[in-house]
Image (cartoon, rainbow, N blue to C red):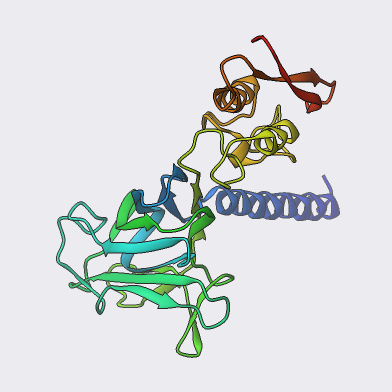
Amino acid sequence: MSKGKVVVIACLLWLFLSVTFAFVQRTMADSTPTSTFVINPAFERLGVNDSFTITVNLTNAQNLFSWQIVLKYNGTALNMTGLWVPDDNVFAGHEWNLLGPIVPFYVDAIDGSSSGVVAAYLLDGDVVTSVDSGVLCCANFTVINAGQSLVEIATESNPLHEYGSPWYSIWMNAPPGTYQLNEEDAVGSNCTVLTVSPLVGDVNGDLKVDIRDLQIVAVAFGSTPSSSNWNPYADVNGDGRVDIRDVALVAKKITEKQTDDLTFFCDIFIKENSVIMLTGCFLSEKSM
């Protein structure tokens, strides 16, 4: 084999190895799990004056040294009654402390939303911990007004605006022995709080059950949370879909309002697109 062919083969082999090495590096980087702040539960269906508790977890964090959580929520619909770090948090078994006081109430200077802030850190700079999933903090809320609202993790793209600067949720890693803190962002989740009427079947929240509520269920009929016509209020029984069971619940409440010898009756036709069309509602002398 000539010297020229050897050089060409060597160059091709070097190129192949370089491309393969770059591909492997990129594949490993792409497969690295994303750190995420997770709120549990993700959904609550409650009435006014009901209370609930959320837990904020951090997943896929390596060399964790400190963290800060900023929770945003609608202060006109929800009241934060408690914010704390439980004993079984991600730093359990290590010496740790809160970074400043827990502040359960801030008002965003731009969008008017309310926020709570809590942060913690390890006391020994040589100690870090890594977690697949661990608890950071918990918060209690009470529903004070009807409506749909979110409890969400404030991120860099959706921060709390306070004291002229943005505040958002972060965690910091410190590779052992380096004493160098690196700020890390994490994807944030939220909890949807749906406040429903105390009256079963009162879909529109006007404290009565009538044909207007049935019409709302009709428009959302056949839908699930991923559907374009999804309306969580139309999911009267809270099973994650709007179907004939929800129609029956509303219709039953409507009929209960009628006199003994008169019954409310609706002709309901299910079209191919799974949307109910109410074609006529009237009083009949006998039950169906």
- Residue at left 59%, top 51%? 30
Q: Is residue 12 left or right of residue 175?
A: right
Image point (24%, 77%), residue name: 101
| Residue 46 against residue 130 in the figure, above or below | above
In front: 95, or 168?
168
Image quarter where the N terminus lies is top right
Work out whether residue 73 or residue 10 is closer to the camera in this orientation and state it: 73
Task: Give whichever of 57, 191 is nearer the camera.
Answer: 191
Which image quadrant is residue 67 in?
A: bottom left
Q: Is residue 229 left or right of residue 158?
A: right
Q: Quadrant of residue 183?
A: bottom left
Q: State the residue at coordinates (69%, 34%).
A: 211
Does residue 131 lie above or below 244 as drawn? below
Residue at 57%, 76% in the rendered image: 111
Q: Measured from the top left, where is residue 124 in percent x and y? A: 18, 72
Q: Position of residue 9 (x, y in %)?
A: 78, 49
Query: Does residue 132 appear in the picture of this structure?
Result: no
Quarter of the image with the C terminus is: top right
